[in-house]
């Protein structure tokens, strides 16, 4: 069976369930590893002029670009960056598929024995120096879960890398090394790419440093791949293999147009279909990570879906173009602006909206605070709705009961808010409320109470829990040694748990 690989991990093709802003869930399972938002400011000014990019031929482009494409090696931790167990993260799938990371002399296949966690792997991935003062753009999955990051330049200089910021939703990350006057690749304009245009992929496949491959742009704007949450991929037939993750995709001028991220393969190796994150997406994310340490995205607070012929007819649309609003989050920018469930958004700031993914791209790249005009079809009639774009909340943020100093009875429990998409994914029908258990520490009070990841907590000691905020308030009243009664929903079934914690 075919699968997507983020040049190092294995996962089946996931079907994208489309929603928007924080409500957007594309159901993307991290892929096999070769594995936005507008930012108001640019990255720090480089102290040296980037390498001149000749257009005389492929040899000149290769000579100009390869000095700026680095090898990134990591030492893994056994836990994610926030201390939680993350057995289902992309890196684990990469190692399950390929065995240990590929070293420069170790060409192990999919059955190769894995190295112990915490050991250094060779040729883990690639990165691109995009600023002469040491800023490197790479894939999130290359450095995800890393305790140490080592960056080796083609001239054999080695540096310790510092992770500036990551964006798992696009599988991008920025790493900084302490150096000046480095060779760098100039940013290119991916929006000017055309199908059939020549491109070169540069990286370190299988630990073979400074490898250059040639291909064409096979397609543009690839989405709904189930690779990342936000997708707008360049598809290319330039050879991309494990270890190319985070490497450069450049045009014939030697300008960076994409970051090599994933392949579609039945074997785990190159089969002519590779994907790169375009610079139209990666440049704003790079700028935002450097300025804010996070990605600031525009947010409406609606769930959306595509139209088909029957839906279009039902909602008074002549053709199946536009984004159907399936849900409006209470007190969201969309709610305050007057958007309603059942509206069909056909235009955004004067730009036609072809489908839900197109609307997603437009909204996430809109500056926070911007007043935006949307043309909607409501009850068969067109009308304009003006919405002030908000900042997308961090839906990955969890509440942790972890302070033993506070005698916290449910220490070791991590939860997050339940939204409609997650409720559907968990098999919950009808109106559901509560918080979802995302992690339970072994031998903790939560573990002793019998809680499991995926449980939806609805009540604690008969007190309703509808949000993380309510969970924190109600659970803080439970002390160690107390009997606690917890009402949960597990796989669609209501269940009371009683334990002395």
Image (spheres, grey):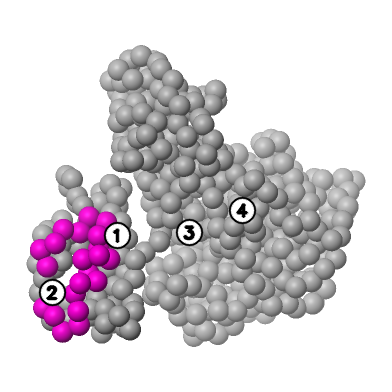
Q: Which residues are magenta?
A: 461-483
In three-dimensional space, the C-alpha distance between marks 1 and 4, rounded to whole angstroms, equals 28 Å
Q: Earlier in the sequence, mark 2 or mark 3?
A: 3
Q: Residues within 10 Å of mark 1 (few under 14, many from 20)?
A: few
Instruction: Say which residue appears at 55% left-offset and 79% top-offset.
Output: 147
- Residue 306 x %, y %: 38, 32
Residue 484, disc: 2
Q: Is residue 204 visible?
A: no
**Disc 3 vs disc 4: which is toward the camera?**
4
Q: Earlier in the sequence, mark 3 or mark 4?
A: 3
Instruction: Say which residue appears at 19% left-offset and 50% top-offset.
Output: 432
Taking depth in this image into account, of 35 and 327 the one nearest to the observer is 327
In three-dimensional space, the C-alpha distance between marks 2 and 4, rounded to whole angstroms, equals 44 Å
Q: Is residue 269 above or below residue 330?
A: below
Residue 469, disc: 1
Q: Residues within 10 Å of mark 4 (few under 14, many from 20)?
A: many
Q: Which residue is mark 3?
A: 31
């Amino acid at each position: 069976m075919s699968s997507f690989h983020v040049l190092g991990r294995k996962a089946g093709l996931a079907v994208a369930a489309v929603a928007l802003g924080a409500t957007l869930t594309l159901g993307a399972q991290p892929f096999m590893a070769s594995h936005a938002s507008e930012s108001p400011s640019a990255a720090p000014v480089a102290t040296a002029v980037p390498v001149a990019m000749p257009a005389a031929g492929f040899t000149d482009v290769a000579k100009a670009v390869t000095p700026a494409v680095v090898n990134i090696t990591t030492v893994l931790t056994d836990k994610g960056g926030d201390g939680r167990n993350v057995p289902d993260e992309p890196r684990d799938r990469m190692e399950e598929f390929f065995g240990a990371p590929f070293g420069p002399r170790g060409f192990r296949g999919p059955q190769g024995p894995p190295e112990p966690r915490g050991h250094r792997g060779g040729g883990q991935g690639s990165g691109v120096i995009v600023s002469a003062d040491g800023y490197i753009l790479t894939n999130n999955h290359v450095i995800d879960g890393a305790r140490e990051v080592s960056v080796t330049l083609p001239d054999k200089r080695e540096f310790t890398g510092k992770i500036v910021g990551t964006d798992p939703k696009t599988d991008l990350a920025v790493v900084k090394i302490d150096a000046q006057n480095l060779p760098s690749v100039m940013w290119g304009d991916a929006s000017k790419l055309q199908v059939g245009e020549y491109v070169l992929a540069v990286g370190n496949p299988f630990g073979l440093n400074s490898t250059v491959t040639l291909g064409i742009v096979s397609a543009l704007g690839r989405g709904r791949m189930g690779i990342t949450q936000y997708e707008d991929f360049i598809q290319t037939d330039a050879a991309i293999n494990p270890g190319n993750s985070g490497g450069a995709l450049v045009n014939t001028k030697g300008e960076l147009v994409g970051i090599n991220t994933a392949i579609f393969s039945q074997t785990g190796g190159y089969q002519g279909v590779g994907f790169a994150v375009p610079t139209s997406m990666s440049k704003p994310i790079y700028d935002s990570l450097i300025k804010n340490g996070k990605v600031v995205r525009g947010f409406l607070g609606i769930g959306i879906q595509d139209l088909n012929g029957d839906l279009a007819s039902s909602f008074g649309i002549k053709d199946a173009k536009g984004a159907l609003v399936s849900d409006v989050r209470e007190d969201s920018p969309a709610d305050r602006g007057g958007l309603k469930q059942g509206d069909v958004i056909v235009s955004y700031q004067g730009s036609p909206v072809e489908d839900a993914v197109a609307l997603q791209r437009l909204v996430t790249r809109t500056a926070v605070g911007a007043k935006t005009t949307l043309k909607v079809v409501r009850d068969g009639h067109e009308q304009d709705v003006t919405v002030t774009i908000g900042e997308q909340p961090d839906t990955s943020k969890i509440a942790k009961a972890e302070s033993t100093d506070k005698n916290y009875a449910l220490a070791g429990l991590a939860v997050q808010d339940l939204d409609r998409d997650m409720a559907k994914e968990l098999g919950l029908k009808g109106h559901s409320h509560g918080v979802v258990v995302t992690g339970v520490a072994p031998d903790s009070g939560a573990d002793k109470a019998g809680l499991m990841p995926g449980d939806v907590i609805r009540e604690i000691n008969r007190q309703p829990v509808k949000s993380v905020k309510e969970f924190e308030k109600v659970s803080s009243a439970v002390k160690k040694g107390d009997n606690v009664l917890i009402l949960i929903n597990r796989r669609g079934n209501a269940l009371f748990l009683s334990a002395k914690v």
